[in-house]
Image (cartoon, rainbow, N blue to C red):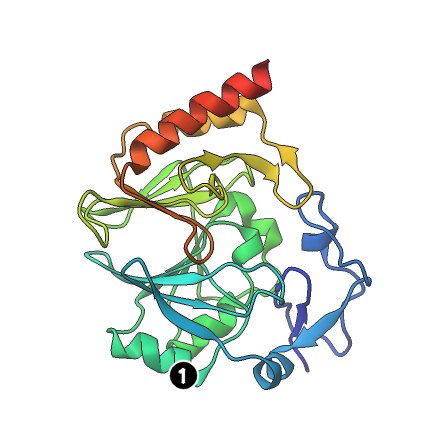
Amino acid sequence: MPLYLCETCGTQYAETPAPPEHCPVCEDERQYVGWNGQRWTTHEALARKYTLRLEDDAGLLGLSLPSDFAIPQRALHLATDAGRLLWECISLVTDEAVSALKARGGVDQMVISHPHFYTSMVEWSEALGGVPILLHEADREWVRRPSANIRFWSGDVLRLSEDVTLIRCGGHFPGSTALHWKKGPRAGGALFPGDALQVVSDRRHVTFMYSYPNFIPMKPSDVRSMRERLRPYDFEDVFGYTWGRNILGGGRAAVDASFERYLSAVSG
C-alpha cells in the first residue's frame, strides 16, 4: 500500500489503501492546509518530479528539496564526537543523497528538532541502514509513521557526547529541540535550533513564534524558559532552518540580544 505524503507540510504517513482524509499536522494552528485544499503525493511521485539540492552550507553538507514543495527546510550532516548525525529531515530520499552521506562516513543517528520536520524520517532511517531517530517524547503524538527505529528521549537535556547536547527548548512545540555542538564545524561552537528560535532575514537576530506561517507569537513565559535552558551554552554560530539563514560569528550575543528585544516588544 502507498505511503502518502502531505504536499503542504511534507509529512509521510503510514501505509493506507487510500490517502488519509486529513493531515492533523496541517490542521493544527501552527501550520495550515494548502490553499487548494488537502493534497497528497507519494515518495515515488516526488522522485520523478524533483532533484535534491546537495550543497555546502557554511562548511556542512546540506540536503533539501526545491522550495516549491512543502516547508523549505534543509537537513545537515554533522561529523561529531557523538558520531555522524543527520540533523533534521526532508521528504525525499535519493540514491545520490545516500551515496553523498556515505562518502562522508555515513550516518549513525538522526536527530529532528520538531514535528514539522519529521517528514520522511522512517524512509531515511531505512535507507541509511536502520539508524536510530531521536525525537523528544513530548511530541510523540505527532509521529504519523511509527517505527522501531524511533527513540524517544525525555527531560530538558540529553548529552550525546562530550561535545554534543540536545536541549529541549519548548515554545514552538513542547518538545522543540536545539542541538549544541561545543566544537562545531567552526571555532567557537554552534547552535542548531530548528524552529525553537528562528534566524531572521537580517541574520543578526532570531525570533520566537508559536506559529511561523500564521504569525502567532510565542508566549513570553516560554521564551523566558528557553532563555534559561540555553544560558549555560556558548556558541559563535547559529545554523538556521534553511539555506544561508545562519548567524556566523557573534551568535551567542545575537541570541541574547534577541531574547531582550522580543520580551521588551511583547511586554510593551
From the top left corner, tell me how far across and down residue 131 is, in percent: 37, 69
Residue 145 shows up from this direction: yes
On-image quarter of the C terminus: top right
The residue that appears at 53% across and 57% down in the rendered structure is 117
Name the element at disc 1: helix
**Vertical position of residue 102 compared to residue 146: above or below:** below
**Vertical position of residue 190 compared to residue 61: above or below:** above
The residue wearing badge 1 is 96
From the top left corner, tell me how far across and down residue 112 is, in percent: 45, 55
Q: Amino acid at mark 1?
A: Glu
Residue 230 shows up from this direction: no
What is the crowding at mark 1: few (fewer than 14 residues within 10 Å), some, or many (at least 20)? few
Q: Is residue 115 left or right of residue 160?
A: right
The residue that appears at 51% across and 49% down in the rendered structure is 114
Q: Is residue 163 left or right of residue 116?
A: left
Residue lying furthest top in this view?
A: 268
Q: Which one is in front, 166 or 39?
A: 39
From the top left corner, tell me how far across and down residue 103 is, in percent: 26, 79
Q: Which one is in front, 141 or 208?
A: 208
**Vertical position of residue 98 compared to residue 166: above or below:** below
Q: Is residue 156 left or right of residue 58?
A: right
From the top left corner, tell me how far across and down residue 202 is, in percent: 45, 41
Q: Is residue 9 left or right of residue 154?
A: right
Q: Which one is in front, 107 or 52?
A: 52
The residue that appears at 39% across and 36% down in the rendered structure is 156
